[in-house]
Image (cartoon, coloured by chain):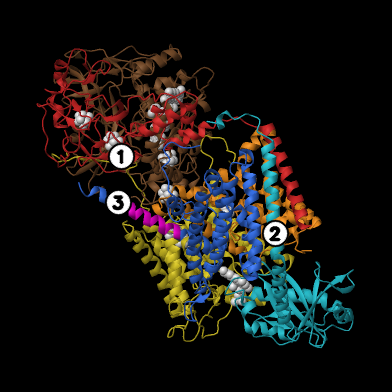
Chain colours: A orange, B brown, C red, D cyan, E blue, F yellow
Amino acid sequence: MNGESLWSIFVNAALVNNFVLAYFLGICPFLGVSAKLETAVRMGGAVMFVMLVSSVCAYGINLVLLAIGAPFLKLISFIVVIASTVQLVEMFIKKTSPTLFRALGIFLPLITTNCAILGLALFQTNKGYDFGQAIVYALGAGAGFALALILMAGVREKLELASMPNAVQGTAVALLVAGILSLAFMGFAGLGA
Amino acid sequence: MLSLLRRYPSFTHGVHLPDAKDDTCQEAIRQFPFAPVLVVPLSQHAGKPSVPTVREGEEVSRGQCIAAADGFVSVPQHAPVTGTVRRIGLAPSIAGAMTPAIYLEPYPGSSQEVAEGEPCNIDQSTPDDIVAAIQAAGIVGLGGAAFPTHVKLRPPDGKVMEVLMINGVECEPYLTTDHRVMLEQTDDVHTGIRYLLKATGATRAIIGIEANKLDAVDALRAAIPADLPVSVEPVAVKYPQGAEKMLITALLDREVPSSGLPLDVGVVVVNVATTAEIGRLLPHGRGIQERVVTISGPAVGRKGNYRIPIGTPLRFALEQVDLSPDVSRVFLGGPMMGQALSSLDIPITKGTSGFVAFTSAETRASPSEQPCIRCAYCVDACPIHLNPSQLGLLAMNAEYDRMADEFNLMDCFECGSCAYVCPSHIPLVQRFRVAKAIVRKRRAA
Amino acid sequence: MLVLTAVGALGGLTLLLATGLVLANRRLYVEEDERFDVVEDMLPLSNCGACGYPGCRAFAEALVTGESQPGKCTVSTDLAREAIAGYLGVDVGAEERQVVRLACAGGSNVARNHAHYSGHQSCQSAALVAGGGKGCFWGCLGLGDCERVCEFDAINMSRDSLPVVDEELCTACGDCIEICPKDLFSLHPVSHRLWVPCSNKEAGDELLADCEVACTACERCVMDAPPGLITMRDNLPVVNYEGPHATTKPIERCPTGAIIWIEPDGRVVKGDAAVRVLRHAPLPDAPT
Amino acid sequence: MTETTQPARPPVWPMYRSLVGIGVLCAVLIVLVFDGTRPIIARNRAEALERAVFTVLPDATRRVTFALVDERRFEPVTNGSGSLLHAGFDADDRLVGVAVEAGGMGYADTISLLYGYSPAAETIVGMQVLTSKETPGLGDKIQTDEDFLANFAALDVKLDETGTTLRHRIETVKQGTKSEPWQIDGITGATISSEAIGDILAASSAYWVPLIRRRLEDLETGGIDAAP
Amino acid sequence: MPLPDLPPTTPTDEFVKGLWRENPVFVQVLGMCPVLAVSNSAVNALAMGLATTFVMLMSNLLVSSLRNFIPKQVRIASYILIIATFVTIVDYVIAAISLELYNALGAFISLIVVNCLILGRAEAFASKHGIGMAALDALGMGIGFTVALLCLGGVREILGSGSLFGVALFPEAFQPWVVMILPGGGFFTLAGWLLLINYLKERREAASVMLQETPE
Amino acid sequence: MPEPGKTLDIDTSPHLKSGASVDIIMRNVVVALLPISVFAIYLFGLAALVTLIAATLSCVLTEHLLCRANDKPSTVGDWSVVVTGVIYGLTLPPGLPVWMVIVGGVTGVGLGKFLFGGLGYNAFNPALIGRAFLQAAFPVAMTSWYAPLAADRFVTLPSSTLTLPFATPVYDVLTGPTPLAALKFDGDVTATGDLLLGLTSGSTGETGAVLILAGGLYLIARNMMNWRIPAAILLTVFVLSWIFHRIDPGSYPDPVFMLFAGGLMLGAVFMATDMVASPMTGLGCALYGLLIGALVVVIRLWGGMPEGVMYAILLANAFSPHIDNLIRPRVYGTQRRESP
Ligand SMILES: Cc1cc2nc3c(=O)[nH]c(=O)nc-3n(C[C@H](O)[C@H](O)[C@H](O)COP(=O)(O)O)c2cc1C
Ligand SMILES: Cc1cc2nc3c(=O)[nH]c(=O)nc-3n(C[C@H](O)[C@H](O)[C@H](O)COP(=O)(O)O)c2cc1C
Ligand SMILES: Cc1cc2nc3c(=O)[nH]c(=O)nc-3n(C[C@H](O)[C@H](O)[C@H](O)COP(=O)(O)O)c2cc1C
Ligand SMILES: Cc1cc2nc3c(=O)[nH]c(=O)nc-3n(C[C@H](O)[C@H](O)[C@H](O)CO)c2cc1C
Ligand code: SF4
Ligand code: SF4
Ligand code: SF4
Ligand code: SF4
Ligand code: FES
């Protein structure tokens, strides 16, 4: 139904309409987990993964809900299914691969009940993406989130050694950097057309 | 253009300094008079202090051993003068502390004949004999570190010394000690090399000399005995070419591993003055009791190279050379790595290669420190390829452990190139010294 | 109809969810002592390490497992310590509170410099340059690294550039001990009131030219003290705190006030014979 | 401390009871609200759509929604999905035009719009942007700029002889340089957005106009049959 | 787990704390996404604030009344269910009230579900307190959230559109600052408010230190 | 000998200093910028003059007043803020309302520099932050360009320059597109001769490509600029656009046009080289330049905007900590380390 090309979906989700910097989704973890580069990288990976999972979940639920004629349960089923799927995955990883768990798993609970994940599920349904498009959309959104997070972390690590005025330290400076990144990302406008 | 610069081997990075050597490099070495009192510290070297073998009031003759080595990493001290032991007590040291020393008062009437000892005959000695003789002569590195030379010559099991490298680079501005020694004690140098080659088992020796001392290169080349496997190699004029790591890289294209020793690449580095001293003393079985010192700098009236008895108080030495009343800073060593002195009462020791004195005219108010602008001048200067800018920022934030763990702080050998070039006047080396001290403290704890 | 669909769908979904959770809880239940969190919450969370553990969480675990006692935390209030003890049902195990003491009294008004240090204004930097230029090599350089490093504001530089420790605020975290290049700080139980605020290892009255309050190693304190209480080492009196040491006897005849008595309120008592220096201007630098 | 001595095996019945209980409660609540608001929302939606349709088809007074069936034929629907057209009729039940929804990428995000096509005049007679995220004060001039909107009062979409393609594809030109009836006069400062409108219209009209013309009678007659 | 030295609280306390001391936006910095996304005009900000307050109030009430009925293991899942229900309700109600507002707020109504703040209040407060306290807490937090949103929305609308609540404030010639309505402006405005608050706090602390020191 | 009673000064080694200092470097940058500024005034007359003065003054005053308000010594003496101000002015359209110039200057220096801790700590180029803010806030004013060499440019100011504070500017003179906008929106290619001579509309200082290069060479010769950055940028742009031009000359402009049109020269030579926000190692700088060049080409050829130098540099600024992290010189005596 939606005729956008996969490439354009990806570029739009990752750069032009970056989830954090243009859509304001997932700001809390973006501010919270971007102070250290290493955690940011791992968090970025975890987000990409969860986005994929939730994209698949949302696609499935939407089909089911349309079939039983209960679109009004969309929100509640999305959130419940996504949250529990991710939790199961988390437990599974914990059991099977402690290394992977330490690298990514500890972030999973942080992400499950997060705007970006639910936003992805809602947007992909609203835009009427088919399965392939939905997957690419999730990949793009996840990559964009990870990119923003990693750029932010780099700058924040650098600023950690700066002698900023006291009032700026902490969240305020993170927001300033986010604002500047958001201005810079405006350069990508029109790329996905 | 590039080929011109590339004519002499060198290392990457480093800085070009105004060399300020013309004042003294033409001055022949002159003998110094004896001071009214000489102060021989018991710790003039890295390692354990030596133990006095004389009592207060005892008479000693010049060259006699007055303090014995305390173990292997230690050297004996020899009387620089014939006279009496006035007392054994504390004396100020370069570091500002009070350390034990032997005070000697020369006999005014003595001929100051140097006592002859048991000669070390090179043909009949085993390498171990030579090492023992070097220790007995009280020889330490005269290049500045004052590390007991004989310790370096004893490789741990399994290591082979392949190349003996004689360090005649003398890259610090103002200093010309090694330059003069190379010109005037050419034969001593070669004799010393002969001893060292035998002691270490190295198959060849290379003398590395900065290309601003080509006369020394010629002199040494001309005097090479036929049977001695020595080559004399000029290297590019660049600071800190004289650091042993840089010299090894320039001449052999090998890198001493991080926190390793030259030995790890089969090299032992000995300063040329140290070598000459070995060559001068060992055939006579004497001990080291005087050394060549450059005294230079704008505040000095009679700049030059002097052979000065160990233990001569600096104040006395400076009186002899007409120090300007306007003196404001005196450094031991060159201006790049030298220590500023807080007092003129310290004695001249074996590690002293020179003094540079500045008047208040050169001491313009040191420009105030500004934030690092990340110009990367320091990055391009550091011969160890560290990132002094990052290290400086971390130091300012007291992140000492990160400096050591992530940014190789402990590899910094404090050459000062970074601080020299920094347009923001950040005291980088000073911060690194502090950081290293704290890291060492923490690692020891 | 709609209600039925909805109830059916959501009921089914929650049934599934509950089953998942039940299974997960059975398979993957990890017993972690909840008291860790509770005790951690009760700690001051300043992660100072004074307790000897890497951070408050580790200390909390040690408390719960009985490895340590609440009293080891020096930052906490008595009330909170008791609360933790009460919660865990253990003894407070309070050790005597420790504070740092400074072994130097040579402020700029009584101790001279020999050379003028003009580099980076930090004791650690200065100490690396010929010891910092102070006449007394062992003495405090007065550039306040300890004041800056103290997170608890327990150290303030006096107007004579000598650190003054506020015993109330000092948590014995040891940061100043590490930072001081002259190693002038050491930890002491607050009950140690007899104190030698000097570290000069030289002897003789010539010292007084460099520092008017230096210990000249005259040994009068040794003579006046009960036998065995004070011995001389490196020309400095050493108090033996093992035995009874609550006496002001040794300070009485000290000519320079290099041995003192510290009142519980932090006031310093010097012997009657000690010189009184009223000057507050710094002494001029003087070469010797 | 009750929790610390918790059994390793959590209680099963309370978990089912509370989760399913809450689930059912929630379902009931949602359905109640949904049922209560559904007609209002539907009416709101219809009104909004109606308003839009009457804006792009100025002469229409009544609207009938058609769907394209089997890619060939239009059939009136009440609430269908898929490609929808809204035929507008005047007071005399004569077909005055067809309102078509179209969308495409704008400057910031997708723009969706509705335009009215008049089969009689073979022109587009109105256009309204339904949703857009174009920059306020800049790209959103495509919704507010009078001069720009005036372009769509009569925009030529005549078919060529074959009856399957437009004679001239719609295009956006630089502001003030419009010279042909199939051109849209762009907006300086919002070139991208105004070009996007042109592109959306061009693509959509190239597809729909031939279809509509071919099956015009479906719409004309169907409309009357379906009239309430 | 009752902490021994938890200070006793009063109902007023629970209500007032959300307004300033523990303001969810300016102090706790929670629930940032809707704050930034829908604060480009004062009306949107107000609507969002009220919607959030409503959801928080209702879910706090329900959570608090069911708190003894929900076992620990299914706590989070139950809370999410409850919250999602009320969000769905709000979603439909707003769509019924005004389609225009509904479109302006976009997906962010749905996203109230995942607003960290609401789950946080349910978990940290409602599950441990009685209905009355839970309601007061929700109201306080909700109003604090709304006020903060209005602070942002006001600034952004005034500069970005030259109006407040849709009423033009300046003469025709006013040049709007488009950036303020764009994402970057959202970040900058919030940063600006935080800066201002930090600065005022610092000033007050400095002043109180001065007061302590002067008697000497 | 020292006079009696005189004490020695002690300080740490090294006791020698090279002559370099921050203010000398910055003053040299200002000197290198002078020819461009003069040329801009020649092209655009009073409009350029007023823009440059307003930009510089607003930046310098902002820094001065902020330092004062925070009880710090003023740091304008290091001249870095003058560089920021002049460069910022050079990136603005001549004739931009003065009040907007001031808004951008205050934002650039206040938000982009001061809040991050002042000189040396700004992770992004302050001048570009000022410009990016203006571009986002007043996109129309920031894309309205006067044609160069207007007859009355030395006697009258364009009406827009003196627009009342907070009011929308009115343009009485016809404005013309920049070469890049002309290409992107109208498909018109500017004559190469005009391009090389700089006789086109555009930002105040972006047109005089030759003078920009000359200023850059001066700084490179004095070791005050890292030549790798402009070299890498220009090379990347040239190569990429050459490839695309070869593939389809109809849709992609030729490489010479790409090099000389728009702000590429000014950005590559004077803005990407801001050492504070760029990587430190040679290889890092090359990579950074490559990134900027590639972004410029992508934005110009496929993006919505005609020009992308500003965005490319800001994005690359955000990448530069990562470049520094990944590309570290191999420390003497260590193995080549794996990137973390
Ligand atoms: C414990 C110790 C052992 C050493 N052993 C050797 C050695 O075996 N061979 C050697 O060439 N140097 C040895 N050295 C000396 C160093 O290589 C080096 O000469 C000294 O640190 C001063 O070098 P620098 O003046 O270049 O800093 C040793 C140093 C220390 C501290
Ligand atoms: C930065 C630096 C510069 C040095 N410059 C010289 C020099 O110019 N001449 C020299 O003999 N030793 C110099 N050294 C010391 C050498 O590294 C090495 O320790 C010495 O040559 C060993 O010889 P020695 O033990 O006989 O002194 C320098 C060391 C450092 C760290
Ligand atoms: C913050 C910002 C927002 C913009 N928004 C739009 C927009 O919504 N629509 C648009 O066509 N162009 C937008 N642009 C692009 C520029 O205005 C672009 O230069 C313009 O579309 C073409 O200019 P011209 O028509 O004057 O040649 C925006 C630019 C910026 C910086
Ligand atoms: C070669 C060079 C280029 C510079 N470019 C800029 C620039 O583009 N923008 C800017 O604000 N400052 C620039 N500066 C000045 C300075 O680095 C700037 O003020 C700092 O970024 C402020 O901390 C430049 C300085 C040099 C040496
Ligand atoms: S002092 Fe250390 S960091 Fe600086 S240049 Fe020398 S080795 Fe490198
Ligand atoms: S030389 Fe100085 S200013 Fe330049 S990068 Fe190094 S520390 Fe920073
Ligand atoms: S006690 Fe130590 S750290 Fe403190 S001021 Fe004195 S020398 Fe410095
Ligand atoms: S003599 Fe004692 S009191 Fe005086 S400065 Fe030295 S250590 Fe301090
Ligand atoms: S509200 Fe917290 S992540 Fe969006």
Q: Reply yes or no: does residue E195 show up in magenta.
A: yes
**Do the residues under discs 2 and 3 have CB atoms within 8 angstroms?**
no
Task: Name the residue tied to disc 3.
Answer: E208
The residue singled out by tag 2 in the image is D32
Ligand 7 within 8 Å of the CB at mark 1 = yes
What secondary structure is found at the residue carrying circle 2? helix
In this rendering, would B232 be left or right of C181? right
Amino acid carrying label 3: it is: Ser
Q: Which residues are magenta?
A: E193-205
Nearer to me, B164 or B348: B348
Q: Position of residue C228 (x, y in %)?
A: 21, 13
* Chain under numbered label 1: C
**The label number, if any, that marks residue E124 in the structure image:** none
Image quadrant occupied by the C terminus of chain A: bottom right
- Viewed as shown, does residue F207 lie left or right of F76? right
The part of the image, by quadrant, that contains residue B174 is top left
